[in-house]
Image (cartoon, rainbow, N blue to C red):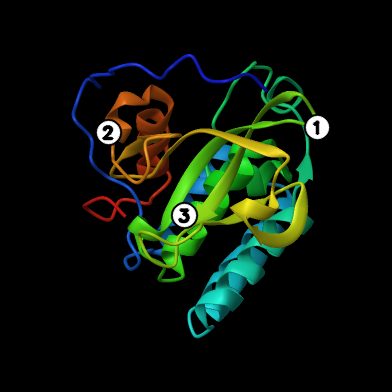
């Protein structure tokens, strides 16, 4: 997996600011769209139902339990594979629905699925960032999801390489490069100062459009 080349100002054809909110998921509509778009087989339908049940059950959990549950769910349900093997493309950002249908994901897909699932579970957008890092031991680019209990807290790292959720200081094997969520973009080494907008990421904008087409059409950013 290579560092993305889409980190540049991107102006979509229509300025779509639509994604998933903590409410408003119409599962019947979503599953109907998924069936039309992806024609999931029986195993894929079972994974999708497991995802729905897990999300419903996670609503009442404590914050730490939500992190553990959702991190472990995707790590265990999806097998790791490269984009070229899953999608026939070098770099492809799959929606959570696509990943569940395929039953496979690369590091970006794991992080994306965890991000939107935690948003659905009630964790606020400003506590979550998708974070590009260099995995030093693997000598390659990698993506994880980071969680901030408060804006100035040390982040916890949710990683497909391990089910253990550890503080960033205990992940000396990861070197941060930049991070983003639905509202902002941060460069490593700049503290907690936002340096840009997620609109600068063309693949992120494409992902939001795709998820809207899948039925995740609640207005407003998550």
Q: Secondary structure at mark 2?
A: loop
Please state which of residues 180 and 192 is positioned toward the viewer in this rendering: 192
Q: Is residue 129 left or right of residue 42?
A: left
Q: CA distance from mark 2 to mark 3?
A: 18 Å
Between 114 and 131, the one lying in front of the other is: 131
**In the structure shown, which secondary structural element does the residue marked by tag 3 occupy?**
helix
Q: Quadrant of the N terminus?
A: top right
| Residue 119: percent from left, percent from top | 42, 61
Residue 42 shows in this picture: no
| Quadrant in the picture for residue 42 | bottom right
What residue do we see at 68% from left, 25% from top? 83
State the image coordinates of residue 34 (x, y, percent, origin top left).
Answer: 52, 47
- Please provide percent x and percent y for residue 85: 76, 23
Quarter of the rendering occupied by the C terminus: bottom left
What's the CA distance linking mark 1 and mark 2? 30 Å
- Residue found at x 59% / y 33%: 133
Q: Which residue is mark 2?
A: 197
Residue bearing the label numbered 1: 137
In this view, the mark in front (1 or 2):
1
Quarter where residue 29 is shown: bottom left
Q: Is residue 122 left or right of residue 155?
A: left
Badge 1 marks a residue whose secondary structure is loop
Give the labeled residue for mark 3.
116
Q: Does label 1 or label 2 sit earlier along the sequence?
A: 1
């Amino acid at each position: 997996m290579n560092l993305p080349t889409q980190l540049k100002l991107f102006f979509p054809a229509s300025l779509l600011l639509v994604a998933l909110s903590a409410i408003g998921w119409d599962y019947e509509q979503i599953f109907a769209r998924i069936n039309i778009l992806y024609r999931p087989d029986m195993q894929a339908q079972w994974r999708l139902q497991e995802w729905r049940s897990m999300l419903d059950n996670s609503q009442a959990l404590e914050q730490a339990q939500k992190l553990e549950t959702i991190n472990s769910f995707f790590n265990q349900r999806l097998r790791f594979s490269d984009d070229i093997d899953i999608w026939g493309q070098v770099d492809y950002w799959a929606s959570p629905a696509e990943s569940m249908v395929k039953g496979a994901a690369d590091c970006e897909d794991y992080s994306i699925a965890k991000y939107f699932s935690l948003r659905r579970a009630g964790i606020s957008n400003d506590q979550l960032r998708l974070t590009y890092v260099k995995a030093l031991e693997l000598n390659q680019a990698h993506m994880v999801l980071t969680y901030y209990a408060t804006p100035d807290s040390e982040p916890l790292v949710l990683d497909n390489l391990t089910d253990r959720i550890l503080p960033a200081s205990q992940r000396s094997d990861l070197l941060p490069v930049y991070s983003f969520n639905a509202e902002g973009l941060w460069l490593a080494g700049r503290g907690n100062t936002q340096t840009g907008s997620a609109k600068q990421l063309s693949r992120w904008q494409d992902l939001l459009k795709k998820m809207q087409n899948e039925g995740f059409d609640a207005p407003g950013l998550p």
